[in-house]
Image (cartoon, grey):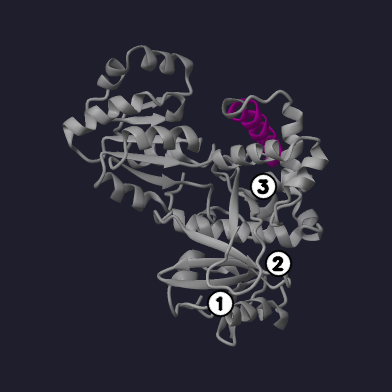
Amino acid sequence: MISREIQRELIKCSEEYPVVTILGPRQSGKTTLVQMTFPDKPYFSLEDPDIRQAAAADPRGFLGQMEHGGILDEVQRLPVLLSYIQGIVDKARRPGMYFLTGSHQPQLHEAISQSLAGRTAMLTLWPFSFSELSHYNISLNPFELMTLGCFPRLHEEGLETRRFYNGYLQTYVERDVRALIQLRDLTQFQQFLTLLAGRVGQLVNFASLSNDLGVSSKTIKNWLNVLKASYVVMELLPFSENIRKRLVKSSKIYFTDLGLVSFLLGIHTPEQASRDPLRGNLYENMVIVDIIKGAFNRGIRPEVYFFRDSNGNEVDLLIKENGQLTPIEIKSAATFSPGFVKGIEKFRALASGRLTAGAVLYNGAQAFDVHGIRVFNPLKVQDIWSTLTTTGEHP
């Protein structure tokens, strides 16, 4: 397994905090990351029923096996342990004792806020970034990546894509979803996932989803919260600061891994992806998620939004960083068109505050500037996040 970009931040956190908590979707490589970085730490998975039962029956005895701390995987399965860890780290007062991983936000966040507030650093690990994928012998072709996805095992072990996502989906729905909500009809939830995949990068319309599935809008919102809580999707909020225009209030939904979207939509080859009507939305999803990965891998919780007003003026992504706002347009076309910069120019005319010139990320080979707006291919730079957020840096 390659070294992950977040590893440097993990080491820094371990030197400052007694506990480091790493959240993220299943199969994103959380356990491998911690075991590679701290190979001498004892490891226990609370997914294993016998280990979970032993820890629940005698928490002090279980933690006593780890004289200098250890790695506890999927710790949300037994949040009571966090209270005992609090007592141990308060007494020992040593950094880098425990490393906790989890794939469900609500249980862990609630337990941490009660027991480990101020005692743990929080990191988020998503599947491979573009720059991490460059270490493997694959083509960084956007349409190939759309169907393959970025989960580490697919690239490390060469697993067959459709078989992997079928197993991933079944395991997720049957285990994780049932752990978060009382769900009678698993098939209906899977239909919801597929419908959401078909609306990727679009404004969320709860009434439309409700009508298509025959369930209430309240249920749709609950299901969407489950997907966000288990890191299957992320929500991009509309930007509304310092704009004197009527703006949309609905958010957009993107999947944290595009391979799952393609699987749900029946897109199994790069040729299908390049011809699909959702090609532009899929490309947008892929690029936005990679930008966010770049921030998380630095321990940054990014402030990202999109812009759209009632007149149809729109910018795909806005990054708020270093006290300034960067507007970004994302296009799947390989040929640049002057129309690509219109949304950015309109936004700059409407918005106030510190704004950068912005950028257009497209699928072409050339990098250049148009009226100060940078135009480049996101797959041809080493680090999209730093390229976009470092003032004056050009790819």
Percent across and percent down for residue 251 are 64, 55
Residue 382 appears anywhere in the view: no
Task: Look at mark 1 in the image and give the residue it sits on.
Answer: 351
Magenta part of the chain:
161-177
Percent across and percent down for residue 175 are 60, 26
The residue sitting at 47% across, 32% down in the picture is: 107
Residue 89 appears anywhere in the view: yes
The residue sitting at 17% across, 30% down in the picture is: 91
Whether residue 172 is in magenta: the answer is: yes
Task: Look at mark 2 in the image and give the residue it sits on.
Answer: 332
Q: Amino acid at mark 1?
A: Ala
Binning the other alpha carbons within 10 Å of mark 2 as few (below 14), some (14 to 19) or many (20 upward) gives: many
In the image: residue 80, left or right of residue 118? right
Percent across and percent down for residue 363 are 67, 69
Q: Nearer the viewer, mark 1 or mark 2?
A: 1
The residue sitting at 72% across, 40% down in the picture is: 217
Percent across and percent down for residue 83 are 31, 27
In the image: residue 178, left or right of residue 9? right
